[in-house]
Image (cartoon, grey):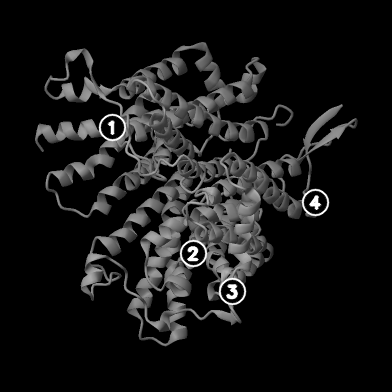
Amino acid sequence: MIAIERSLDTPRWQRIALPVVSLVIAAIIAGIVLVLSGHNPISTYQQIYAASFTSPGALTSTFVYATPLLFTGLAVAIAFRMRVWNIGGEGQLYAGAVAASGVGLALGSWPQPLLIVMMMLGGVAAGALWALIPGLLRAYLRTNEILTSLMLNYVAGFGMYFLIYDSDSFWRDLTTATARVFPTGKTLLPAATWPGFVFGSFTLPFGFVAGVVLALFLLALFRLTRFGFEMRVMGDSPSAANYAGMRTRRTIVAVMALSGALAGFGGASQIGDFGHVLDPRGLEQAQYGYTGIVVAALALYNPLAVVIVAILIGALTNAGFALEGPSFPAGLVGTMEGIILFSVLGGEFLGRYRIRIGRTPQRAPIVGDDSGSLTVDS
Amino acid sequence: MNSSIAVAIAVSAIAYGTPLVLAGLGELLTERSGVLNLGVEGMMLMGAVTAFYTSQTLHGPGSAVLVVAVVAAGLAGAVMSLIHAFLAITVRVNQIVSGLALTIFAGVIGLSSYVGQIWNIGGQHGLHQLSKIDLLGLSGLPVVGPIVFNQDAFVYFSWILVVVVSYYLFRTRIGLYLRAVGESPRSADAMGINVTTYRYVHTIIGGALAGFGGAYFTLAIAPIWTDGLTAGAGWIAIALVIFAFWRPDLLLVGAYLFGALSSLGFTLQANGVQLPSEFFSALPYVMTVVVLAGASTTLARRRIGTPAALGVPYVREEG
């Protein structure tokens, strides 16, 4: 007989092969789309590669995009792994940026190390608080957090616009006549700039290093602590977690706050590492929060893999912005990201099931497996 | 508030609510079959861009062009939903991530923006726009005239659709089977209902209706194309399905309430009310959160609505 059945575990090589194959498939399908629309895929990919890695300053700007994606990718990875569907990374990043720029402006006279720590704390706290709204609603009212967290992205976006474009807020520059007509945010003092690590022509942002440290911390949290164990059980089998008497509500709230805190850190890094000013339009166009979903899924929700994937997707995003213009198709980046996601999802299925011929089928596991695959709450 | 402002709000509530009715009905049918499609925003954008391109390039009498444009938008939405249907029903992947993938793929930085640039329609002014139809010559009536009897064909279509879908779901055998597939696919399968076919068909119908909803933006609300012009309407449509407890009649009410909220800012500002524009812009999104929280307590208390198998792939061999 021929049967499709669940395999009990995912071999390690598959966890590496799957994302690689997905990227190749995405490149092929996007290549077909490019040909159909009259572009030369080879030269387009060459352009992307050059703009991401080899042209002068390209690698530095790839890391400018990789840094926020590292944070939003981690935020999505830990939430989705626990089946807490936080789509609000975008708004939580905005909240973090607003808080960090506020702190940076208010405490500009403080000594630099202290000021930087305060900016980080501000961003983390604001992101966590913004995520607590959908988190508490989900935990205590069972309100669908996908929709609430997403709606709050728009609310945070309008809030940011209000601060800069439609009010005389603390964040807005009102010192010159030009700034009154063309609204911009106040620029932070140099002391509030996070120091990057310079290697010749390449600058590694401070935030990226902090993100790598956080990824290691998250891995340790998952593997070594009781909290991490509870989160893993909840992710794999919510009913088992319930039977074991785990406090699922508290864990949901904690996961949501942690996820929001990571995205908020990304927002603080936007201010401290790169922008040094609250720029609603720039943050909104970048779509880091949503792209974090792509990063996390391609990394199969593994925090360390998020670091590498963030660089890859950061490169693609960087190329998209650098090459923007009449000869480079707008929307190619999102289209490719969508295809990457579809391929990863399809590949995960192939990894989870195998076709068996001519032997009695093995019994399928009753609860979910531990391969990092996800199924919806039932 | 005098009656002319009230009428103006009602009229624009219908204008802004109509795409929500169309896309919401589509998602409602999809979810009733047990498939959760979070790609509505992406499907709407593909519908919007396809409809606008078709209406700009086709030559012929205006009404014929508009009909073709709407059909093309429906096809675009249906093709997009087919990707999700294949992944969710056949490959049985996580439906939440697959739907998000569809929104990223087709959405504001994805394929809809891509084809918008290829077709070079950004910045063009629309050549065709849905016009109001004076139904039965009654548009002159006070209050109800402009609200009920002076709408475009798409609005009348959406009203008919609400009735048809309600009848289909609750009064026909196929509708009963559909609900069975969404509640308990195993029992439905045992009854000889083809679960896979039901899910595919209703996911694709959902996509087509989302495409129609998108078309309403570019053919009726504002005849232009800009990236991401639906601005989250697809997500509000998904929220409305929950708010309406998966019932078409309540969906219509909810859609118009949100339509009213979306247009409230313009109407009040036109009448001299001074408040920051961001306040009004954020209002529909804030209200969605509030309404969802309210609906979830009702759902929990009365245990109604949610199709039991929503988001759960059906595997005959397992379980």
Instruction: Identify the image quadrant of the N terminus of chain A.
Output: top right
Q: Residue at x 24, y 52 (%)?
A: B277
According to the picture, the residue beneath numbered tag 2 turns out to be A261
Q: Are marks 1 and 4 on the same chain?
A: no
Compute the Cα span from label 4 to label 2: 33 Å
Name the subunit of mark 4. Answer: A
Q: Nearer the viewer, mark 4 or mark 3?
A: 3
User: Identity of the amino acid at label 4?
Assistant: Pro
Task: Tell me the element at label 2.
Answer: helix
Q: Which mark is residue A11?
A: 4
User: Identity of the amino acid at label 1?
Assistant: Ala
According to the picture, the residue beneath numbered tag 1 turns out to be B15
Compute the Cα span from label 1 to label 4: 54 Å
Q: Quadrant of residue A107?
A: bottom left
Compute the Cα span from label 2 to label 1: 39 Å
Name the subunit of mark 2. Answer: A
Residue A154 locus on image (x, y percent): 38, 51
- Residue B304 visible in rendering: no
Task: Tell me the element at label 3.
Answer: helix
Q: Are marks 4 and 3 on the same chain?
A: yes
